[in-house]
Amino acid sequence: MVGVGPDGCKHGVDPVEHGVSDLSSSAPQLFDVMRPSGELKPLELRGSGLRNSELRASGLAFAPAMAAGLSAQRNTGFHSSGPLSAAAPRPMPNPRKFPRMCAASGQEDGLISLDVGKTEMVGDTSLMASNSFRLAKTAASWWKHHDKHRSRLPQDHLNIHYDQEIGVGTYGEVFMGTIVKGENTGMKVVVKRAKDGVPDPEDPRWEATHKEKSVDEEQEEQFAAGYLTVEAYINDLIKEECPEIAAPYIGMCTKSGKRWLVFEFLEGKTLEEYLIAADEVFSLQPLATALGMRNFIDGDIPSLQRLVNEIGGQLLKCCLALEKAGVAHRDIKPYNIFIANEKLVLIDFGSSAAMGVSERIGYDYNKSPCDPRYAPPEQFIDEEQWAKYDSYCVGLILVRVLFAPLWCGRFFDEFSEAFHQARYDLDSWLTKIIVSDAGVEKKPGPQIGFKNLFGAQEETRDQEYVDLADQSCSFPDDGSRLNMCSIKEGLEVLNQKGGGVCWETLRKMLKRDPVRRISSVKALQRVMAAEHRIGSRRTFFKMLGLRAE
């Protein structure tokens, strides 16, 4: 069906044009595919997907403890259009402009060869194993033959625990479940359904009603059905291309006409939960332990450096794997990062887009950012630099981990607003913090040389930040939560030279212009090269019976 979004544009699939009377039903949905002749051909898509609200039920579903915080979350995400568009599919972009990794000879200074999955990276190159890198897929590979790849679960294999609801979002609901037949008998699972208006007679809480729905309610149901369809497709693609970066997806199950996405249950928490807990106890120890760092020490700069490098490295590997699969997640944030088995995985692909196929499944150039707090300056995904959208989100997540006051969600909201007012420039934001810090001497003088911050070389300015933080810490506590002293440890980590998550890396990840923004592979190289040097140094000192500082 066609709905009118806030932008005044029509979105969705016209049922008259395609001969479909109800896109919310359990009948196969349609999407336009370009014939070789250039005309449109309707194509069946029986998978289903879902885009949840701020908390994204798919993410919070993986641990029962998450349900307790569901009602406290704010719905800051928004969309101006639906997931499916009746517009003609866009042609593939010029491959010379399309972001990709090209083989090249030589090796950049300061970078080492890295082995990430099936990829051997040398400098800024990617020498792939045969058939392992298919970024520019065509319709013949996935979308056109989705039936062949789709993961299915027979309806009698799944038992849904309607009394164990984990999360509810704008577009979906999540419950616990159990697989009762087949090779996975007894497995605890998380199941997700769309709030698409399709009745669920197996739900004991469901009652048949004949209430007339408003236009907005009908449109939300259509969107919910469409998001579930897209998410099912993306999860299948991720399962095929890079299953290690996401929550284990079992498949789609249709029970009594209701479509469900089924995921293996994982014990763990989201990164958001760990950050909120860190703010409450003022310690990153639980987060570090969850990631396997047993010797983490709060207040120790090398410990914090290893932690942010670990988080940054794992998330950038996820971004690189998504880029190779041709997928843009578009909603990477702590809510959608799950930590289980000492590993970070991404969840909730309901807002993702398969940019590597010619039809660009799930992509709408009018779709606004899912969460503006973590979205890059371009807000709407850049068609040619789409892979750098997710890596920018990772950069902001690292800022939040580094600066202790931002562990609190409310303070991160305030940071986000101030950061946007500073035109997405971290140095401009810091300058405002310095100006408002009562503990920093504002008058020009030999003590700190505050006047030199403006227009100073980056290396000089980075050290100046640390000096100003020291000065702020020597000032009597005025009760301010966010000042230079409160972020001193993060500033010291960023001031470290030699790669890793440092000022040079972070500034490149957060460039306003996506063309100038560092790619995920280059950022990953910097992080892993730094960890390689730190690890070698630590081993050397251990051999001498000393501790590497």
Image (cartoon, helix red, strand yellow):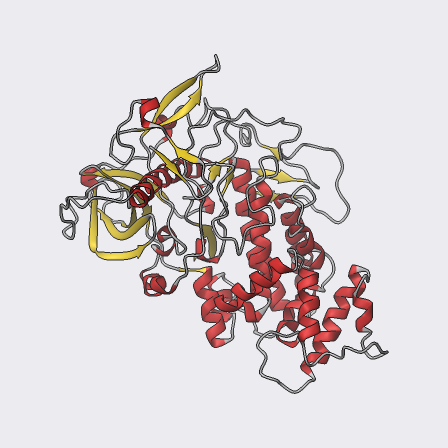
Q: Residue at x 48, y 36 (%)?
A: 364
Residue 110 locus on image (x, y percent):
75, 49
Q: Point out residue 153 in the picture as x, y percentages from the top left corner.
A: 26, 37
**Number of marks present in the image shown:** 0
In terms of depth relative to the viewer, which is nearer, 196 or 177? 196
Of 485 and 73, nearer the camera is 73
Residue 394 in the image, given as x and y percentages of width and height: 56, 53
Q: Is residue 111 left or right of residue 303?
A: right
Q: Quadrant of the N terminus?
A: top left
- The relative height of residue 527 versus residue 33 in the rendered view (above or below) is below
Residue 314 coordinates in the image, percent (x, y): 54, 52
411 shown above or below 355: below
Q: Nearer the viewer, residue 97 or 415?
A: 415
Q: Which residue is the extreme one toward the top?
A: 37
Residue 101, compared with residue 111, is above or below; it is: above
Q: Which of the 4 quarters of the picture holds residue 437? A: bottom right
Q: Is residue 156 left or right of residue 386?
A: left
- Residue 547 in view here: no
Residue 106 located left or right of residue 292: right
State which quadrant residue 182 falls in: top left
Name the residue located 66 percent from the left edge and 73 percent from the top edge: 488
Q: Quadrant of residue 450?
A: bottom right
